[in-house]
Amino acid sequence: MGSVERGPSDPTQPAGGPPPSAPRTAPLIVLSGPSGVGKTTLVDGLIDRQTLPLRRAVTATTRGRRPGEVPGVSYHYWTHDQFRQAIARGEMLEWAEVHGVDFYGTPRAEVDAYRAAGVGVILVIDVQGAGQVRLLYPGDHRSVFVLPPAFDELHRRLEGRGEPEASIRRRLETARGELARADEFDTVLENADLGAATDALEAIIRDDFTRRGF
Ligand code: ADP
Ligand code: 5GP
């Protein structure tokens, strides 16, 4: 399976965002899917191609850093207190409690200024966050749900990433609920072959740049 288009997020809005007379704003792409399906790998691989002006929003989390992750690049690592204060100051575009233990959220500063400067922004967030963005930016974003080729493959990829067994179990439990919500997204994209999935994601985003007059 390649990608399956489902049309714009809000059927009452024209596809592709603002009318031609409005200032051009670069795409906002929401990418969700179960932990371990390969969202980060896909997005970082696409950005590395340098075929489109794109940036992955660096989101904030209260979870601990994994080996190899870099603060301010992989995530902003915040304490629960820092996270609560950012919410109270109105600095979060969306946030959610994921896997029942940790908070994750997108700081507003990671999104609007980049889009206004012509850089497409990709949010790699969970299905709850995707639902919030759907309400905040109706008709002004595209949402993509990444599917694994098989459920067992998720387990293998999480193991391959070096997750401890308890963390794998929690992520696989969350995954079942997330997979049930795939049809809320504009497009469903299977990440079996990484190159093919990256090509499909690139085509979706390129199409959105074109619709926006870039
Ligand atoms: P996510 O961001 O969705 O949690 P990651 O990008 O961290 O997932 O990927 C999880 C693991 O799966 C990583 O070890 C990554 O190298 C591997 N992976 C990603 N895409 C593929 C693919 N198409 N085929 C095989 N392994 C993959
Ligand atoms: P992980 O701990 O595996 O890096 O991420 C767990 C889940 O949290 C993933 O589904 C990831 O997409 C999601 N996530 C990461 N950042 C954010 C965010 O800013 N907001 C929301 N809602 N989810 C996020």
Image (cartoon, rainbow, N blue to C red):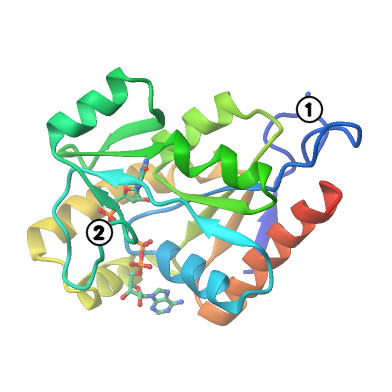
> Which residue is drawn at the image coordinates 30% and 24% (left, top)?
87
> Disc 1 and disc 2: Cα gap in Å?
38 Å
Residue toward you, 176 or 88: 88
Q: Residue at label 2?
A: 71
Residue type beneath disc 1: Gln
Residue type beneath disc 2: Pro
> Which residue is drawn at the image coordinates 13% and 57% (left, top)?
167
Q: Which mark is residue 148?
A: none
Give above or below for 186 relative to 95.
below
* Quadrant occupied by the N terminus: bottom right
1 or 2: tag closer to the N-terminus: 1
Q: Residue at label 1?
A: 13
Taking the view exactly as shown, the residue that stands out farthest to the right is 21
Residue 176 rendering spot, x and y as whole percentages: 33, 48
Say left or right for 189 vs 150. Answer: right
Tell me: is circle 2 under 8 Å from ligand 2: no
Give above or below for 109 relative to 179.
above
Residue 35 rendering spot, x and y as whole percentages: 32, 57
Q: Residues within 10 Å of mark 1 (few under 14, many from 20)?
A: few
Kind of element beneath mark 1: loop
Residue 204, by quadrant, is bottom right
Say left or right for 164 vs 61. Answer: left
Residue toward you, 190 or 126: 126
